[in-house]
Amino acid sequence: MPELILHHYPLSPFAEKIRLILGFKKLPWHSVFIPNMMPKPDVVALTGGHRRTPFLQIGSDIYCDTALIGDVLEQLAPNPSLYPPAQKGVVRIVAQWADSLLFPVAMAYNFNPEAAKSFFANQDPAHVQAFVADRTAMRGGAPRMPAPDAAAMYKSHLRRLSQMLEGQPFLFGGQACLADFSAVHPLWFTTQQVPVAADILKSTPHVQDWVARMLAIGHGDHTAMTASDAIAVARSAKPAALDPGQHFQDEHGIPLGSDVVIQAESFGTEPSAGQLVAATRTRYTIRRTDPRAGTVHVHFPRIGFVLKRAGT
């Protein structure tokens, strides 16, 4: 089993998703804490610009976005599986719904005025101001959803989850799957980080019980690592050989070897630049060289990311 290095910070909901998957699969991992807002020089040394949390490092291969990280961990440790055999497609669809629709609604609710006051109560005002500015920039300046609308939508989403949990412990049956991990992490934030706002779950006891079952999975065996040590690991390694059997799927008229830029479609759109070395059905890979990290391969999923030729 290769050495797994998760770059994250404790209060990141998406990092909690991956921490729980690592616990579910009983995979040992190294924990590198990164800043929760820019600047992130150690992050950029590895990703080339992508700043969203978390990302997974295996040697000098850097995997961005939790959907891709989940697939990587599934390939490394197929059992227990994140994908029930007969329900792979619908599990992925529900996971994407949770990450793209449930999450922003839940977080808008989690930072309603009362909850935000509780969350930031003991933090330095200058830090709070910087954090709010950072997240506003990540949203491209778009306003946060009004708290009453967020509450109403969150309740609707919770009822839908509750309906899925009637008569079974997890969303798709007797074992947790990717959909469970994708749906639980914003609820983890509600129940564990802003408990003053957690009463919203009282009307859906099936969901409350499910959250408890999910969080009981834990994070597995992990040890602390410094960012400098993680960068040294990348510098001393070589990127894994790309699978020659993977089909090059060209949707852009950009041949392999071209200088390209890849960025998230929305939210945290800082670009990463490099040489396109793979474009499979499911992911892009760029090669880049950093003075500190050396030559790395940075991997992104196709869904949620945009590829452009450099300079366009």
Image: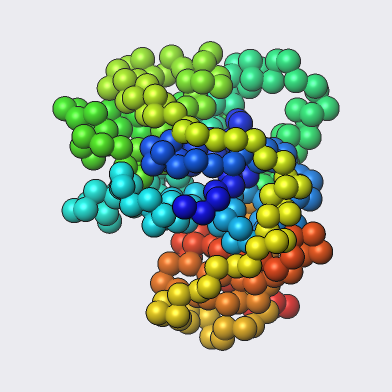
**Quarter-of-image position of residue 236:** bottom right
How far from the left and from the top, in percent, is residue 178?
A: 36, 45
How far from the left and from the top, in percent, is residue 127?
A: 79, 29
Front position in the image: 281 or 226: 226
**Quarter-of-image position of residue 15:** top right
Horizontal side of 160 relative to 65 (left or right) equals: left
Residue in the picture at 54% in, 42% down = 29
Front position in the image: 259 or 157: 259
Horizontal side of 50 relative to 22 (left or right) equals: right
Residue in the picture at 59% in, 26% down = 111
Q: Tell me if residue 3 comes above or below residue 118 in the rendering.
A: below
Residue in the picture at 27% in, 56% down = 89
How far from the left and from the top, in percent, is residue 238?
A: 63, 67
Query: Does any portion of residue 22 appear in the rendered image?
Result: yes
Front position in the image: 23 or 100: 23
Query: Does any portion of residue 271 appear in the rendered image?
Result: no
Q: Tell me if residue 22 comes above or below residue 191 in the rendering.
A: below
Residue in the picture at 41% in, 72% down = 281
How far from the left and from the top, in percent, is residue 201?
A: 38, 19
Front position in the image: 96 or 57: 57
